[in-house]
């Protein structure tokens, strides 16, 4: 796999939406010039979803953003990776994450412990598998300094979520010049500030209850007032790029200037809106040649 660059699409709909629509969209996104498709992992058959996207495309990278390490064994993950790459070629990237205590402990209280050590053990398992998952085909959802250091030492780099260009700069410094920095950026094609921020708050308020994200945002200079009432305008505007196509392209350029190799764009839309095909099409001309 060549070093990942350009602009990708991060989409829960490609994973959990209608499968037929997802494979049709994947083929179109590849034809539009996007360089990667990223899907989340909050339960279910993630490897089946990856295979659907790989089978619908020919050259684009398909990635997990992220594979939840509490939901899979290292052996299962390594076996699936090697099976899929053997069949579809070297275009699968496994983003791995430790998730969040409130989510994991909700079904099994006390399971979420020592996230850094748990991540290291999962990576140990990938290395010890009968057919290992190569270091250069995996990245970590790293936010803080210790997880970023683990990403530098044990993977190809980092795939941070809910971050700003300032965090991208810190991630670049942490993983060094050779590590991959592949941030997710939420976007809304809407020029009305009230409409855009209302949609952003409806999507982001969930994350403000998760300590990993809150702690990272505090490191970036946000405080208690920013997390109140669904998020301050300052915080919402820092996390979500909204406005015209050019406004969104400018934010992507800021990540690149801060050291990102690749940025994956998550278009935020109403929960029942389906795949945001119109927005993906409108954004392609200003994003796919941006890196």
Image (spheres, rainbow, N blue to C red):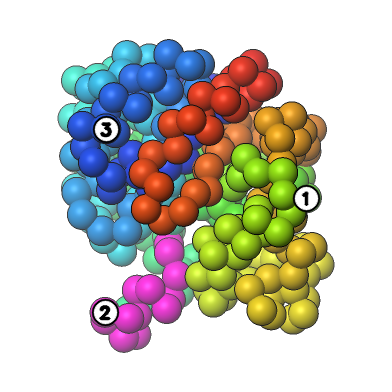
Q: Nearer the viewer, mark 3 or mark 1?
A: 3
Q: Element at badge 3? A: helix
Q: Quadrant of residue 259?
A: top right
- Structural crowding at the residue carrying mark 3, measured as other residues with C-alpha within 10 Å and reported as few (<14), some (14–19) or many (≥20): few
Is there any visible trace of residue 39 in the rendered image?
A: no
Disc 2 vs disc 1: Cβ atoms closer than 8 Å? Answer: no
Q: Is residue 263 above or below residue 91?
A: below
Q: Element at badge 2? A: loop
Q: Is residue 176 above or below residue 105?
A: above
The residue wearing badge 3 is 21
The residue wearing badge 1 is 166
Residue 290 appears at what percent x and percent y?
A: 68, 21
Q: Nearer the viewer, residue 78 or 132?
A: 78
Left or right: 50 in relation to 266: left
Q: Element at badge 1? A: helix
Residue 291 appears at what percent x and percent y?
A: 66, 21
First to last magenta residue range: 98-110
Residue drawn at x 60%, y 58% as measured from the top left:
200
The residue wearing badge 2 is 107
Q: Nearer the viewer, residue 122 or 17?
A: 17
Disc 3 vs disc 1: Cβ atoms closer than 8 Å? Answer: no
Q: Nearer the viewer, mark 2 or mark 3?
A: 3
In the image, residue 214 lies in the stretch drawn in magenta: no
* Distance from the alpha carbon under mark 3 to that under mark 1: 36 Å
Task: Give the mark, 2 or 1, whose residue is nearer the N terminus.
Answer: 2
Residue 207 appears at what percent x and percent y?
A: 54, 68
Residue drawn at x 31%, y 86% as measured from the top left:
109
Task: Give the mark, 2 or 3, whose residue is nearer the N terminus.
Answer: 3
Residue 15 appears at what percent x and percent y?
A: 30, 43
In the image, residue 101 lies in the stretch drawn in magenta: yes
């Amino acid at each position: 796999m060549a070093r990942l660059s350009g602009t990708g699409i991060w989409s829960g709909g490609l994973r959990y939406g209608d499968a037929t629509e997802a494979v049709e969209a994947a083929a179109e996104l590849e034809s539009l010039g996007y360089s990667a498709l990223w899907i989340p992992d909050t339960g279910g058959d993630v490897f089946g979803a990856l295979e659907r996207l790989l089978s619908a495309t020919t050259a684009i990278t398909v990635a997990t953003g992220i594979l939840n390490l509490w939901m899979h064994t290292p052996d299962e993950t390594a076996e699936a990776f090697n099976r899929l790459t053997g069949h579809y070629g070297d275009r699968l990237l496994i983003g791995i994450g430790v998730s969040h205590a409130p989510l994991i402990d909700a079904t099994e209280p006390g399971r979420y412990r020592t996230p850094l050590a748990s991540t290291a053990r999962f990576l140990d398992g990938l290395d010890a598998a009968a057919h290992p998952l190569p270091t250069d085909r995996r990245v970590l959802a790293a936010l803080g300094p210790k997880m970023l250091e683990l990403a530098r030492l044990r993977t190809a780099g980092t795939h941070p979520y809910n971050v700003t260009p300032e965090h991208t700069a810190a991630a670049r410094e942490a993983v060094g010049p050779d590590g991959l920095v592949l941030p997710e950026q939420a976007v809304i094609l809407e020029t009305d500030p009230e409409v855009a921020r209302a949609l952003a708050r409806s999507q982001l308020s969930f994350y403000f209850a998760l300590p990993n994200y809150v702690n990272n945002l505090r490191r970036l200079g946000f405080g208690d007032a920013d997390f109140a009432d669904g998020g301050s305008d300052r915080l919402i505007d820092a996390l979500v790029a909204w406005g015209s196509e050019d406004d969104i392209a400018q934010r992507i350029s800021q990540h690149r200037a801060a050291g990102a190799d690749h940025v994956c764009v998550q278009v935020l839309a109403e929960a029942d809106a389906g795949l945001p095909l119109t927005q993906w099409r409108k954004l392609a001309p200003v994003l796919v040649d941006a890196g």
